[in-house]
Amino acid sequence: MTRPLDRLIRPRSIAVFGGKEARRVVEQCDKMGFAGEIWPVHPREEEILGRKCYRSVADLPAAPDASFVGVNRGLTVEIIRALSARGAGGAVCYASGFREAVSELADGDDLQAALVEAAGDMPILGPNCYGFINMLDGALLWPDQHGMVRTERGVAVLTQSSNIACNVSMQRRGLPLAYILTAGNQAQTGLADLALTALEDPRVTAVGLHVEGFDSLESLERLGLRARALKKPVVVLKVGKSEQAQLATVSHTASLAGNDAVSSALLARLGIGRVETLPELLETLKLLHVAGPLESRDISSMSCSGGEASLMADAGVRRKIVYRALRDEQRRPLRDTLGQMVTLANPLDYHTFVWGNREKLADAFTTMLRGGYALNLVVLDFPRLDRCDATDWLTTCHALVDAAKVTGAKAGIVASMAENMPEETADALMAEGVVPFLGIEEALAAAETAAAIGEAWARPAPAPLLKAAAAEGGPVTLTEHEAKRALAAHGLPVPEGMTAETAEAAADAAERLGFPVVLKGLGVAHKTEAGAVKLNLASRRAVLDAAEAMAGVASGFLVERMVGRPVAELIVGAMRDPVAGPVLTVGAGGILVELLEDSAILTLPTDEASIRAAVSGLKVAKLLAGYRGGAKGDMDALVAAVASAASYVVSNASIVEELDVNPIMVLPEGDGVVAADALIRLRK
């Protein structure tokens, strides 16, 4: 177990090893006013930037809190071993040529293992790592230029990519950056562990991560719980794919539960926000820095243009936000302020009748902000400052600031195009507690994400994630009858049925069960495509004919009583994700699986409230609710059935490779559900 990272990212003393890159680290620390000690180490130089050079780790005055090791990869291992033995606080390993270069350098893997061994319990970042920037203390283990300024409080941004870190440092959006931290190869210390350390700094308000894959489920889980406890939100921009699961081709579950969908479900469970682009990440962090998570998805929008109001309305359709209608008590004051020619709605086009009038604008904005919305937005694109006069636009900003101060409501100015918000305006708005949003899509993404975090935090903390290592051995596929019996033992309703080896025995079974029946061929993966399913067989002759027709592909037969006409058909499945372990899928089933691609992921363990919420969010939920006057589906029975499947997976977590129950026939309200087909693959 490594020591805490506090000394490393908040150092009082810094040692630098190497030539050009080490010199740049000293330059950056001096430029940003680092008040601690800096000790250069170089085998030949007498001094670097006015500071005495030491010859080795052993010659240093004391064990440094943080070290930047900017030497070749072989020497890096030696220096890390010496620093660890000296009791140093941690180090950045700048050199490349480790695991990331294994296709070019055969010893890359071994050298990375040697580096981790040399570090022992001393924290290291990297290798192949640029380092970090701490603008709260002016401590920069960073061998390059950047665009940041000192700040007293702000957000932390973490990434595996040094170049993206450089790009983020150059942002001109008004976002106060407290830390930028990179992790390189994450040979020892991952982004989640770094994020946990950043969260503990009382000057950090929120944390954003750009990641390609999660290195540790346990660290991610700790991060989510700690963020909730500290009331400091975390947002993730996840790109790429984690190592692909060995997905089977015998079911539909694999195609529905991709790694990306599992990542989203995992983050949602932990109360960690997720965004899709880098601008969305930065705009969301701005909102969280100023306002924290939102209490609801209700937002208001105001602009002096119908075109802008339409853009906001259309963008909202693609987001899980709500432009809640105006309250009755808002209408009269708005009418008195804006006049008779303004259509009172949300989004609101307040026209130009009050343009340039700070008092009237503030009155209108105050009325909107008293509507109980979680966030109130004003769309405002500034003219070019090098060619135009922005006085009236600043008046609008002042009016919104006035309204926000009077009401205490959360507010933001939205530039529809990012380049139309001057940086000095963004900085001034942030100083007044009003969020300057650059881009309509980005503003609504930020609102959606902040609301999702707020909803997650309003619920009880989630149970610990299911952790079950996969058992050894290859997978074995149960017969449909065996699968249904296993699931029925956990409470899943299945049709009454019997197996038979011959056509005559199948016909006998049908007579005992009572017609009509379903006949299925055993040992066939995709029964419908193979012609191994026959429905509504109403006589012995029909059963015999059907059995003889499928005898060439079937190893036996399953005869079941025919289920009544369902309101809807759903699929419930499970698969093993390489990071999250077994996860559950619920979605539109039957022949609609591929057509609708309508599904939700449930991480495990789960509960009936989470299951009901997942089902309610599906497109097929409209059928369950009684679409166009049709019968309602038995939602309670469906939720219980999904819970039964989850119970089976949890109880067999180490051996379940795949589960596919498709379709679950949801009957009219009060009549229950029936699992018409089931497939299970277990590790033996």
Image (tube, helix red, strand yellow):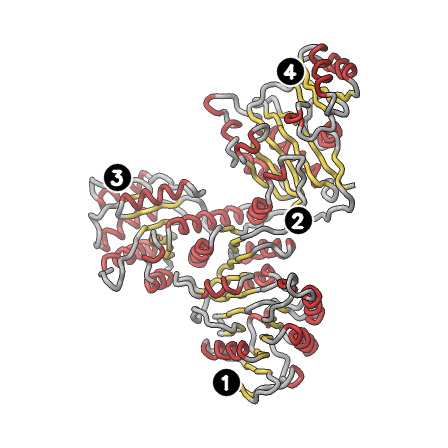
Which mark is on residue 354? Answer: none
Alpha carbon distance from label 1 to label 4:
88 Å
Pick the quarter of the image with the C terminus: top right
Q: Amino acid at mark 3?
A: Thr
Label 1 or label 4, whichever comes before in sequence order: 1
Residue 436 is at least partly visible in this image = yes
Name the element at disc 3.
Answer: loop
Residue visible at 55% across and 56% down?
Answer: 211
**Dot in front, 2 or 3:** 2
Q: CA distance from mark 3 to mark 4?
A: 59 Å
Q: Which residue is mark 2?
A: 578
- What residue sits right under mark 1 in the picture? 49
Q: Amino acid at mark 4?
A: Asn
SS label for mark 2:
loop
Q: Is residue 27 left or right of residue 495?
A: left
The residue nearer to you, when weighing 410 against 39, is 39
Tell me the element at label 4: strand
CB contact under 8 Å: marks 2 and 1: no
